[in-house]
């Protein structure tokens, strides 16, 4: 190949757009020709310079809100118009007064319900034990408290049953002080922190997708661009949340986030087009360590503690 | 393919084709995923074209609104990113035309660009990134629209010639010529900074 032909094809060679025979020919010429090779090096250097270009442009957080208002929100127009119709019904003074009355009743009911004593704890009870009251009275209160009965019924029950002294039943207290126990359920209250809850959920989704991705030996590469970007973001979050959990002595949270971190690091460090074996290694580790189960368990405990 | 639940949002299982299908079926979460995945390249591309941050945000919004409204017309064989870039290109072009009509066109003989492109060699390593960014941004703005378009898509967004042809509607021959000339102009403006001795 002559140098002028090579120079003419150099940009396409750099762009990877040359047909295979030309590509090979230019490559061979570059090995042999110092001048053309220097030109190619200069062109590559120039390309590197443009690769460093940082526009410092970010997608502003409000942009999606604006776009959604013109797109998906319009699609949900039917629901919105229904809401507007309901609002219109309550626009008249009489309807407004009715609404206020209804609201007051609901608030009152909620108040009354919240003032009721806590439900009776579960106790071991013999089926025909005559010492235990059969009318639903609370053994912890000597059978004297039964909100659902009238005062007359209550006093009758009190006199009739006369419970004998007996061993105090074993009752499981949910809120026992366990400040000396590191893995107390109290730590799971951290799930009330929406950031942690959301982080755990997103991490769980990411790991599930990695665990479920089909990997076959025939695949040349797997596009993980999005997952990698997501993992990087989650990794940054994870570090902050883990430190926060440590500072607040929420040890179960801290332990879980510590366990999660190596997975996020591994996914974040994958190339955009990862080799199947690299994805498979992470996939197998996700399965083996049951990290997804741990995340789900954590979420469930958090939900139950709310 | 079976539609995916929200639980798998943003994962490997959400291929562009799946997302498009789901949006057509009225799944708003799928459109949000498309936005999250492509908003950054789209806003960067538009910014490269219009060189105005606030305008780029506005035009990105317009791009995604148009995309949502016409996504059902997208052909199955079309790549989602190519299709979005095509819409972004049209939106940016309309804006540039409107701006040109208002005599707010970019000054092609931007003196600041020429001042930066003197002949004093400065090693690349010594070039502050902010200085480099400003230089590239101004040099891009100085290119004419077609050259800026192909240069941005090829060099800054690594699109293939085929994708650029699909986005711009240009023939491969035209885009090759424009790209070559754009590179030459950009090289001329940054040569001293890059220390590039390559002559075209």
Image (cartoon, rainbow, N blue to C red):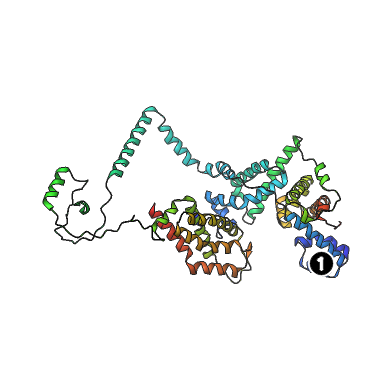
The relative height of residue A154 versus residue B172 in the rendered view (above or below) is above
Residue B165, image x and y in percent? 73, 54
Residue bearing the label numbered 1: A26
Q: Helix, strand, or loop for circle 1?
A: helix
A76 or B199: which is nearer to us?
B199
- Residue reaching furthest bottom? A217
Is A34 on the left or on the right of B46, as rendered? Answer: right
- Residue A86: image quadrant is top left
Residue A163, image x and y in percent? 14, 55
Q: Residue at x 73, y 56 (%)?
A: A51
Q: Residue at x 51, y 58 (%)?
A: A203
Q: Residue at x 69, y 46 (%)?
A: B46
Please state the chain letter of the residue tagged with numbered disc 1 in the rendered image.
A
Q: Badge 1: few (under 14), some or many (20 or more) residues near its Cα, within 10 Å?
A: many
- Residue A40: image quadrant is bottom right
B129 or A64: which is nearer to us?
B129
Is B68 on the left or on the right of B115, as rendered? Answer: left
B131 or A37: which is nearer to us?
B131
Residue B198, image x and y in percent? 85, 58
The relative height of residue B180 versus residue A2 in the rendered view (above or below) is above
Any part of residue A201 in sight = no
Residue A121, image x and y in percent? 26, 55
């Amino acid at each position: 190949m002559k140098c002028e032909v090579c120079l003419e094809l150099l940009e396409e060679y750099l762009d990877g757009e040359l047909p295979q025979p030309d590509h090979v020919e230019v490559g061979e010429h570059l090995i042999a020709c110092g001048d053309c090779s220097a030109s190619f090096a200069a062109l590559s250097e120039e390309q590197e310079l443009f690769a460093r270009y940082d526009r410092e442009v970010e997608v502003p957080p409000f942009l999606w809100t604006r776009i959604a208002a013109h797109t998906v929100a319009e699609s949900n127009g039917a629901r919105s118009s229904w809401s507007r119709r309901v609002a219109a019904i309550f626009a008249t003074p009489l309807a407004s007064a009715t609404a206020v009355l209804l609201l007051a009743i609901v608030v009152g009911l909620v108040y009354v319900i919240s003032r009721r004593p806590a439900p009776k704890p579960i106790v071991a009870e013999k089926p025909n034990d005559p010492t235990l009251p059969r009318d639903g009275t609370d053994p912890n209160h000597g059978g004297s408290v039964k909100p659902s009965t009238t005062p007359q019924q209550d006093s009758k029950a009190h006199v009739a049953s006369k419970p004998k002294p007996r061993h105090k039943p074993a009752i499981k207290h949910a809120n026992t002080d366990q400040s000396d126990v590191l893995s107390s359920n109290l730590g799971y209250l951290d799930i009330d922190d929406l950031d942690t809850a959301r982080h755990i959920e997103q991490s769980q989704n990411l790991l599930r997708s990695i665990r479920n991705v089909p990997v076959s030996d025939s695949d040349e590469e797997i596009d993980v661009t999005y997952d990698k970007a997501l993992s990087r973001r989650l990794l940054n979050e994870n570090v902050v949340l883990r430190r926060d959990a440590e500072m607040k002595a929420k040890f179960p949270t801290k332990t879980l986030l510590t366990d999660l971190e190596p997975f996020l690091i591994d996914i974040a460090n994958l190339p955009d087009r990862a080799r199947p074996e690299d994805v498979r290694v992470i996939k197998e580790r996700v399965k083996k360590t049951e990290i997804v189960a741990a995340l789900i368990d954590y979420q469930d405990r958090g939900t139950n503690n709310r | 393919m079976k539609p995916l639940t929200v639980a798998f949002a943003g994962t490997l299982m959400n291929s562009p084709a799946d997302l498009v299908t789901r949006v057509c079926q009225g799944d708003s979460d799928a459109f949000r995923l498309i936005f999250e995945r492509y908003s950054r390249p789209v806003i960067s591309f538009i910014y490269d074209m219009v060189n105005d941050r606030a305008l780029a945000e506005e035009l990105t919004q317009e791009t995604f609104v148009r995309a949502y409204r016409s996504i059902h017309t997208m052909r199955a064989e079309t790549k989602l990113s190519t299709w979005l870039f095509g819409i972004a290109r049209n939106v940016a072009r309309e804006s540039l035309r409107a701006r040109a009509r208002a005599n707010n066109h970019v000054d092609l003989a931007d003196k600041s660009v020429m001042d930066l492109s003197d002949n004093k060699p400065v090693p690349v390593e010594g070039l502050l990134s902010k200085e480099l960014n400003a230089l590239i941004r101004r040099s891009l703005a100085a290119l004419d629209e077609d050259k800026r378009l192909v240069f941005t898509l090829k060099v800054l967004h690594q699109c293939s010639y085929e994708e650029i042809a699909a986005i711009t509607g240009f023939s491969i021959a035209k885009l090759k010529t424009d790209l070559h000339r754009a590179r030459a102009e950009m090289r001329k403006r940054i040569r001293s900074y890059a220390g590039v001795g390559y002559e075209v």
